[in-house]
Each structure stands twice: as structure tokens, then as C-alpha cells.
Amino acid sequence: MALLKFIFIFFLVTFILLLVTAYTFFRKIINSAKRFQQRENTHQTKVNGNVIYDSRSPEESQKRIIPDDEGEYVDYEE
């Protein structure tokens, strides 16, 4: 009878460990898929052979970075 209890507890613990391992594995797959989907939503531009990823929305990427009142051109005189 003690042997049957030991075997039952052994299989129960093994089953629980298997479930935890499977859950961890599927969670990693889901997180990787989410990361890949986020990468698909980025805009890709190639400049001189370099790839630039832009994850901003098209409206946000059209905004001016430097306001009109900054960065005036000044003639350089020696």
C-alpha cells in the first residue's frame, strides 16, 4: 500500500511539473509572437544600405521635431 501511495505521489508531482513546463513554453511562444507583431507595425526605411525602423504613427512621424522659432540660420562672417 505504501508503494502505491509513493507511485501516485510521484506521478502527481511529475504531472504538475510537466504542466508548469508546458505553460512556460507556451508563454514564451506567445510573448515572441507579440514581439514579432510589434515589429510588423513598424515602418522600414533604407538609407545608404542601413535599415531604419520607425514605430511611430504616420501622424506623429510628420510632426516637426524642431519648432520654427529654434535653429535659425546665421551667416558666418570672418
Image: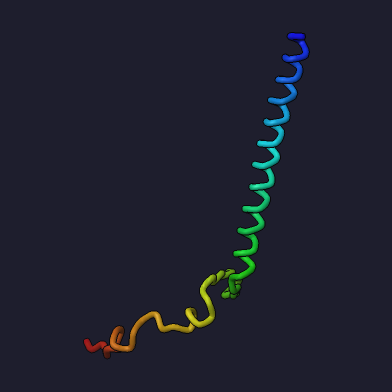
Q: Nearer the viewer, residue 76 or 62?
A: 62
Q: Residue at x 36, y 81 (%)?
A: 66
Above or below 66: residue 42: above
Above or below 19: residue 12: above
Left/right placement of residue 48 relative to residue 75 reads right
Q: Nearer the viewer, residue 43 or 71?
A: 43
Above or below 8: residue 42: below
Q: Residue at x 60, y 64 (%)?
A: 38
Q: Nearer the viewer, residue 57 or 11?
A: 11
- Residue 44 image point, x, y percent: 60, 73
Residue 76 picture quarter: bottom left
How is the protein colored in the picture? rainbow
Residue 74 picture quarter: bottom left
User: What is the quadrant of the C terminus in the image?
Assistant: bottom left
Residue furthest top as drawn: 2
Left/right placement of residue 25 relative to residue 51 reads right
Residue furthest left as drawn: 78
Residue 12 picture quarter: top right
- Residue 25 image point, x, y percent: 68, 43
- Residue 7 image point, x, y percent: 76, 17
Q: Residue at x 69, y 25 (%)?
A: 13
Residue furthest front as drawn: 1
User: What is the quadrant of the N terminus in the image?
Assistant: top right
- Residue 70 image point, x, y percent: 29, 84
What is the tally of numbered marks visible in this picture? 0
Left/right placement of residue 8 relative to residue 46 reads right
Q: Residue at x 75, y 20 (%)?
A: 8
Above or below 5: residue 72: below
Q: Nearer the viewer, residue 49 or 62?
A: 62
